[in-house]
Image: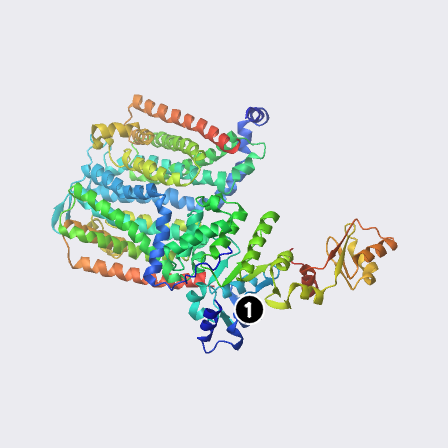
Amino acid sequence: MTTLASDTTQVQPLTAAAATRLLVLRNYVVYRDAWKLFLTGFLEPVFYLFSIGIGVGALVSGFEVGGKEVSYAAFVAPGMLAASAFNGALIDSTYNVFFKLKYVRLYDQMLATPLTTGDIARGEIAWGQLRGASYATMFLLVMLAMGLIDSWWALLALPAVLLIGFAFSAVCMAATTWMRNFQDFDKITLVQLPLFLFSATFFPIDTYSGPVRWIVECTPLYRGVVLCRELTTGTVSVASGVSVAYLLVMGVVGLLVVRRRLDALLLT
Amino acid sequence: MAALTLSASRDLPFIEGVRRQVDYWAVLWARTWRGVVVSSFLSPFLYVLAMGVLLGGFVDADPDVMEGATSYLAFVVPGLIAAHAMQTAVSETTYPVMGMIKWQRIYESMLATPLGPRHVVGAHLMSVALHLAATCGLYALVMAPFGIYESWWGPFLAFGSQVLCGMTFATLVYAFSTRLRSEEGFGVLFRLGVFPLFLFSGAFFPVSNLGDVGGSVARLTPLWHGVNLSRMFALDNVTWWLAGVNVVVLVALMLLGWRLAVSGLTKRMLS
Amino acid sequence: MSDTLSESAGQRDDAPATAVDAMIVARGLRKSFRQSSGASFEAVRGIDLEVRKGESFGFLGPNGAGKSSTMRMIAAVSPVTEGELRILGMDPAVDGPAIRGRLGVCPQEDNLDQELNVFDNLYIYGRYFGLPKQVVRDRVGELLEFAKLTEKAKSRVEELSGGMKRRLTIARSLVNRPDLLLLDEPTTGLDPQARHLLWDQLFRLKQAGVTLVLTTHYMDEAEQLCDRLVVMDKGVIVAEGAPLELIRAHSTREVAELRFGVGEHGDHAEALADLGERVEVLPDRLLVYTDDGEEVLAKTHERGLQPLATLVRRSSLEDVFLRLTGRTLVD
């Protein structure tokens, strides 16, 4: 340490993009050694597709999507695609963020450097998106191999999945800032599971009638599921645009709240 | 080691050792039961509603294909309860066991008293058994009005097979947890073990739908034995020699798990 | 170094005149927290201080004195409630990232990245400062040497001992070559051997010209490391000066410690009151402040009193604190 002044490289100001890249780098280094865990994460929606889509699908005749008859597997697959983006975003931005925020106080460490709370929020979401995108790509390839893709619109399913991930990451991360302990996470399960099971993932929306159907149509995962389904079956309509706008607004609002809440929590 | 087993068997009978830990587990239960209600009751109930009732409305139920069930709901519920028993057992013998070994070091403090590893394992598994009984029992009560059970004695035997199925996983996974150094192993266990079992062991669809090879593989899994037993009793469609095989397999695996759990904890904590 | 400093200080019109060489200037600094009950709690109640370049400055005080709150404001992660604060000539409310880029922070609780190994803890953290990869890599090698952790480069954080974690946290705070190093209770919870190792390393940094600011509730640590310190109690500064100055001003040269039987200390205090300048009664012993401790012991025996144990020592900052606040530092 006698050479303390040997290199005189100055600390450089960070742009938002550079800061986001650094946070992604940090998570990449963590996951580099846990690639098995990373890989097995991709299997989850595939297992669901095989089990429910194929196994239960043998007992169910197909459904009609946008005036088009599709097999049960082709019906369930886009639902699993959207639900997997939802689940991934949820886990990343609740359990993992809580752990870093309250338990190991990782964000305090980061804030001792030139990084800001905005950088942290963007960085965590960007990482979740990269992970979500790689899972989604692999899943879409599985769908293609199984002949469950009907249209070139399916190419847009990838950005659609990213949009779903972004919207849920931002909102869930905002919710996490209000969590006090791990017991509070039981409440997340209370939201996660009903959304997963009842957002027209496994059966069509017309299973519901009246106000129940209205409510389901207004929930975010439903918008994501139908968006993906419209893209992979090639039945895009005005409703698809509504879904996109819905998810976009949700994500932006969530991000603004996260920023404010992290400031309030960490910069006291 | 030898001295330890000796003193444990001479000084403290198994029942007495377990009894001394009742207060500890009671305090723990008092603190956590709310979360338990959510995870152990609400989530399987939602599965039943979504898959059994709503998706089931689209299934043409042919009793010949559906292992004797007259509706998809009747088919799926006994299987789901057995699968849920597995999940409950696994969640109570993974992170909690590792936590008590290396994070909060509860076992270390327990083993500093006259208690030995088999008492500690016994009390922990007793708590799991109680939890399984409460969940599966509550479940049977709620499902009874849906007309799933075909006889008055079916629910009781089905309940027994669900708890047995859960305990088989509890002892096996406990044994696994005592040998695991880092919690990362649990991620792999859940994703490559528990989750595929949940989806492919006949809870959601007849394993014959998996084809000859797939079906045979599924029948080798412990969960299939639990699901099959639970369903046969619930639907009053029992093939007795098969039920015997199911019970023998589950009990044998449970005893194996018990031995491995005690030896695993002994090696981990006392060597 | 001093060029960049005076330059950045000079950029601001409102920079205090004294700030040319001042790393930290605080005037009337206050910090309040809103508690969950809705009431407001004032942790820092108006303090003035100035830390100069190359100096080693300490905050001494018991838990809850307001040291950590002050440190967090200086680290530009806690907004100032009232008063003025300039760090390196900049306003933390405006230039937070720029200030933090030139600070090294070693918090009271090690907040190492548990998911990264030792090397990556330093490397990733260094990258947060916007430094080029190769520069960070070179510095990490050097810092591992400094922290005596080269062998442990690939180890997980949870495998390290308490002292190793602390050294790693301090090494991490040096990765950006800070102009100002903030250490919050650097040796709390360490065994004596680890403390001395750490002191040695901090002393070497001080020699190398790094400005150190540290909080501590150990008087020996303050005496070892600080050129100048403030004693804080209940959010205010109760004394300021060099350790020896403070001892000279607020205490006697020596202290005689006398231990009697349980419950006898109060009675004997009166009997011995005239032997020193001052007598303090603690739960387990009597302290007689004097310039000649041996003489106090001799006179005590002359008066027929038989203490169970005795000790004559030099006055320390602990005595200063006791004198100023009527309380001991560590309870």
| Relative to B236, B110 lies left or right | right
Q: How is the image coloured?
A: rainbow
Task: Tell me which amino acid carries mark 1.
Answer: Arg
Q: Position of residue C161 (x, y in %)?
A: 53, 45
| Relative to B50, B102 lies left or right | right
Instruction: Identify the residue at the far top of this view.
Output: B241
At x 61%, y 68%, the residue is C237
Q: Nearer the viewer, residue B260 or B251?
A: B260
Residue at the disc numbered 1:
C52
Q: How many marks?
A: 1
Q: Position of residue C245 (x, y in %)?
A: 68, 66
| Relative to C35, C136 lies left or right | left
Question: In the image, is residue C30 above or below residue A231?
Answer: below
Q: Position of residue B181 (x, y in %)?
A: 44, 37
Screen quadrant of the C terminus of chain C:
bottom right
**What is the quadrant of residue C126 in the picture?**
bottom left
At x 46%, y 52%, the residue is C142
Chain of the residue that carries numbered disc 1 in the rendered image: C
**What is the quadrant of residue B75 in the picture?**
top left
Residue A179 visible to an observer of this rendering: no
Q: Position of residue B2 (x, y in %)?
A: 55, 24
Q: Nearer the viewer, residue C19 or B74?
A: C19
| Relative to A217, B247 lies left or right | right
Residue C283 visible to an observer of this rendering: yes
Q: Nearer the viewer, residue C319 or B42?
A: C319
Please, what secondary structure does the residue beneath circle 1 have? strand
Question: In the image, is residue C327 above or below residue B19?
Answer: below
How dense is the environment of label 1, judged by Cα within 10 Å: few (below 14), some, or many (20 and up)?
A: some
